[in-house]
Image: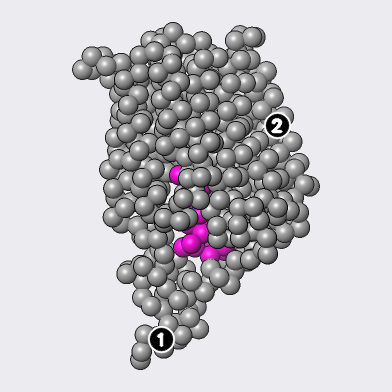
Amino acid sequence: MSDLGAVATGSRQHSGHDAATIIRKVAWRLMPLIMICYLFAFFDRINISFAKFQLQSDLGLSDTAYGLGASLFVIGYVLFEVPSNLFLYKVGARRWIARIMISWGLATAAMVFVHTEWQFYGLRFLIGAMEAGFAPGVLYYLTLWFPPSYRGRITSMLFLASAFSGLVGAPVAGLVIGHMNGVLGMPGWHWLFLLGGLPCVALGILVLKLLKDRIEDAGWLSAAEKSYLSSQIAQQSRHPSSGHSLMGAIRTPGFLTLGLVYFLIQVASYGLNFWAPHLIRVAGTNNPTVVGLLTAVPYIAGAICMVVVGRMSDATGERRRFVCGLLVMAAVGFFAAGFFDKQTALLVVALAVMGAGVVASIPAFWALPPKLVTGAGAAGGIALINTLGQIGGIVSPVMVGRVRDLTGSTTPALYVIGATSLVCALIVLYGLPESLRQKDASQ
């Protein structure tokens, strides 16, 4: 039988079981490396929270100055995100993701040369600029390889790496800060950035060598498997008339609303990521290793929740209501963390609820944008939504830091973030257009 005949026959005859086998084959080939890359990307965002106390002491920074430095990372990210993803669409995801990883890894490792407040500000901005486009680039890359009916689970797998970054990274960061301080004459926070940055360079090289840009380039898939996978992605994906370009995406009803929703989700996410170690320390735990271990709790809860929700949302085809429920859970966690801010055991429980809601809401949310945009619209549109969301990463650290400087307490800021999470849940439930209310094809 000719290759053409094999393709046609394969496209017709693949059963549901065979389809799952193909998806599993693709997932095992792509996801381990992508997840490791994403783990380091997320750790690059939260390592500043573990470096906070030593870094502030060495550089003489106030909480407001620390919050500004943390936010400058996001400002650099936001300014370059959409151009980065549009360039990714032109040159290919593999090459551009590799470039991002290598350049941000070198910039992160360069934190060992920071000795002044302004050096801190400048390098944090540069790290954000170098990492710009990574997360939306990976999300766009996954839409090229997986049908919509599998994206809940696949996106959850990707963001599981962020949970593992907190789960593994938090205790490791605590150990590095606590036990490598003074090794070779460097403070512990220098070691933290060095060990977080250099592996990214090696991972970028692996991305360049191991990943493929298109299904057609995958030598590890048969002709029939390539044809079937491509046809399933084409058949299950909706093709909106206005979402094929960046400007078309912006004009699509519901697109900017998704940007607002992600902004509010990121206000909550950065509230958790940047301030969880601080909350635990203020509640009475001073040992850096113990702080790291307790900080892992919300990420464990988030990992469990995102896997469960990913499978349930794929099984039902429902996306919107799951996002809404997770945001309500996050709000409860923030309110409880403010109420129990001086009781470590109850605070950790509150952080677990917060983590389950915040961490799991992010992959659940990212199943929504591909329902509106395709092609260049997907590459640039996903980046723009992520950019609008990342502005929440500018607002949240500065707002919490300023509240602490003014009141001496983080509690009022936690209540504000809890309230914004509830507002976000209401927008998701009642403010999205019909195209985003429809269920996806279920498995």
Residue at 42 percent of width and 43 percent of height: 38
> Is 360 positioned to the left or the right of 6 in the image?
right
> Is 274 positioned to the left or the right of 180 in the image?
right
**Alpha carbon separation for disc pair 1 and 2:** 55 Å
Q: Quadrant of residue 30?
A: bottom left
Q: Callout 1: few (<14), some (14-19), or many (20+) C-alpha neighbours within 10 Å? A: few
- Residue indicated by mark 1: 4
Nearest the viewer among 195 and 384 is 384
- Considering only vertical position in the picture, is 134 above or below 414? below
Residue at 74 percent of width and 50 percent of height: 432
Q: Are marks 1 and 2 in contact (CB under 8 Å)?
A: no
The magenta stretch is 134-151
Residue at 71 percent of width and 45 percent of height: 257
- Residue indicated by mark 2: 420
Q: Callout 2: few (<14), some (14-19), or many (20+) C-alpha neighbours within 10 Å? A: some
> Is 428 positioned to the left or the right of 149 in the image?
right
Tally the numbered discs.
2
Q: Main secondary structure of the magenta part?
A: helix
User: Where does residue 198 sit, x and y in percent of width and height?
Assistant: 29, 35
Res 311 seen here: no
Colour scheme: one colour
